[in-house]
Image (cartoon, rainbow, N blue to C red):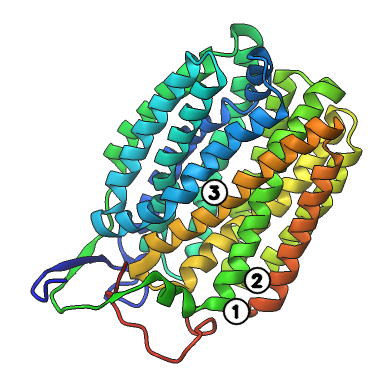
């Protein structure tokens, strides 16, 4: 790095101005949450459609697993680099570019006629979305402190869930009455609208200039400073997404083929999950600020494991919805707490990088679980074994978090060594 170069950094915890004292800090979080809710309509609108779309093209469970995995693999590869890029060029450009790519991929879906085109579109969707979620989480981290970060992450998750409530329900009814291609077109249009909204309403946080030369620190050194905490959080995040991948592929196929649910019923199912998580994210996000993050993560993982057993026993729409409510409670307990705790133990200069790293961890679970679930369903004709596996992984996540996370984790309590943190480090 040029010693005379000027480095621009977000003002965050431990720097000149506390984020919760900055005018407009939480306002920006709300604006981002609104934009995310509209984007999530585009994500959610296609969820009830994929099993029927796959069936109409003559595909089986393994192909549906490959479709889901292609999205995750692209995000695994690009989440870290896109997170680092957001640290360098800012969050807003990455967010806008990601939305544009996501809209394009939905238009490709609408006119796909074979599995190769669909998998390619899904991989493109994963590639561009690899930038959106790390940048969004990093932007919230820029704008908050340890005192209000759980609350802010809860608001962001709430915005995510608002779209998740509307999207699947809308997609199910549109597919039922207008066909399975129209929802993809509407999702692309909604995403373009979101891009315009985000461009207008969301700004980069206030910055300060640092003219002193700062050293480059490899990502492995950043990870080593909180090795135990990062390991436990990675396992908890992996477990969360592993169960969701099993549910979306193996169990959705099971529900369509063996239970006989209709598209609108899948929409209702995901809508109820979304409403529960929308409320839970706010409640448990605030609770994590007041009472700590660790035990919400542990208990949420155990509840998620229990819900997998409930899905095995479900035989109709009512019991499916009850199991979904239990799952959503567990996910809303641990989701905002995990995201907030990642930021709590990370230097502000590495927020985007670390959100990208954990995005890769999350998507590695979503890469393997749909393939495993789809293959098991093809072999057995049932989702029971897949659901048992998902429950076991959730229990493992709870045990690791209980053992490795301190009761009150922060950059100090999770530090691997005693060297003081350097403000303004650049992560490579």
Q: Position of residue 1 (x, y in %)?
A: 17, 71
Residue beneath disc 3: 157
Q: Is residue 87 above or below residue 406?
A: above
Compare residues 392 and 297 and report the one nearer the observer.
392
Q: Residue at x 34, y 58 (%)?
A: 84
State whether residue 29 appears in this view: no
Compare residues 7 and 34 and report the one nearer the observer.
7
Q: Position of residue 174 (x, y in %)?
A: 60, 14
First in sequence: mark 1 vs mark 2: 2
Q: Residue at x 64, y 8 (%)?
A: 177
Q: For residue 70, which quarter of the picture?
A: top right
Q: Residue at x 61, y 56 (%)?
A: 335
Disc 1 and disc 3 in contact, CB within 8 angstroms:
no
First in sequence: mark 3 vs mark 2: 3
> Which mark, by number, is residue 408?
1
Q: Is residue 360 left or right of residue 13?
A: right
Q: Is residue 159 above or below residue 102?
A: below
Q: Residue at x 80, y 57 (%)?
A: 392
Q: Position of residue 273 (x, y in %)?
A: 69, 39
The kind of secondary structure element at disc 2 is helix
Disc 1 and disc 2 in contact, CB within 8 angstroms:
yes
User: How many residues crowd mark 2 within 10 Å: few (<14), some (14–19), many (20+)?
Assistant: many
The kind of secondary structure element at disc 3 is helix
Residue farthest top in this picture: 178
Q: Is residue 397 left or right of residue 199?
A: right
The kind of secondary structure element at disc 1 is loop
> Which mark, by number, is residue 294?
2
Compare residues 99 and 245 and report the one nearer the observer.
245
């Amino acid at each position: 790095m040029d010693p005379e170069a000027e480095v621009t950094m977000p003002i965050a915890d431990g720097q000149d101005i506390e984020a919760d004292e900055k005018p407009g800090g939480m306002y920006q979080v709300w604006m981002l949450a609104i934009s995310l809710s509209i984007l999530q309509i585009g994500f959610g609108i296609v969820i009830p459609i994929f099993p029927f779309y796959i069936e109409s093209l003559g595909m089986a469970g393994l192909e549906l697993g490959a479709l889901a995995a292609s999205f995750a693999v692209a995000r695994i590869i690009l989440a870290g680099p896109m997170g680092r890029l957001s640290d360098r060029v800012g969050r807003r450009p990455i967010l806008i570019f990601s939305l544009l790519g996501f809209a394009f991929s939905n238009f490709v879906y609408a006119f796909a006629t074979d599995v190769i085109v669909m998998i390619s579109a899904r991989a493109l969707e994963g590639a561009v979305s690899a930038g959106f979620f790390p940048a969004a989480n990093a932007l919230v981290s820029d704008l908050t402190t340890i005192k209000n970060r759980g609350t802010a992450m809860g608001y962001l998750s709430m915005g995510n869930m608002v779209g998740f409530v509307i999207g699947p329900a809308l997609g199910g009814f549109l597919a039922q009455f207008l066909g399975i291609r129209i929802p993809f077109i509407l999702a692309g249009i909604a995403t373009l609208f979101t891009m315009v909204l985000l461009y207008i309403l969301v700004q980069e946080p206030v910055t300060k200039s640092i003219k002193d030369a700062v050293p480059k620190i490899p990502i492995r050194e950043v990870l080593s400073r909180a090795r135990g905490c990062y390991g436990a959080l990675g396992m908890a995040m992996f477990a969360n997404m592993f169960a969701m991948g099993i549910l979306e592929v193996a169990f959705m196929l099971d529900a369509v083929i063996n239970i006989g649910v209709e598209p609108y019923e899948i929409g209702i199912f995901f809508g109820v999950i979304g409403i529960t998580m929308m409320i839970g994210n706010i409640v448990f996000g605030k609770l994590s600020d007041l009472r700590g993050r660790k035990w919400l993560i542990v208990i949420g993982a155990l509840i998620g494991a229990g819900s997998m057993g409930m899905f095995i026993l479900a035989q109709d729409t009512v019991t499916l919805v009850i199991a979904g409510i239990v799952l959503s409670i567990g996910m809303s307990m641990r989701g905002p707490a995990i995201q907030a705790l990642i930021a709590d133990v990370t230097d502000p200069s590495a927020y985007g990088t670390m959100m990208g790293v954990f995005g890769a961890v999350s998507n590695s679970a979503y890469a393997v679980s749909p393939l495993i679930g789809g293959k098991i369903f093809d072999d057995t004709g049932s989702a029971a074994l897949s659901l048992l596996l998902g429950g076991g992984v959730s229990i493992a996540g709870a045990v690791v978090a209980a053992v490795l996370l301190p009761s009150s984790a922060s950059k100090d309590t999770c530090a691997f060594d005693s060297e003081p943190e350097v403000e303004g480090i650049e992560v490579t």
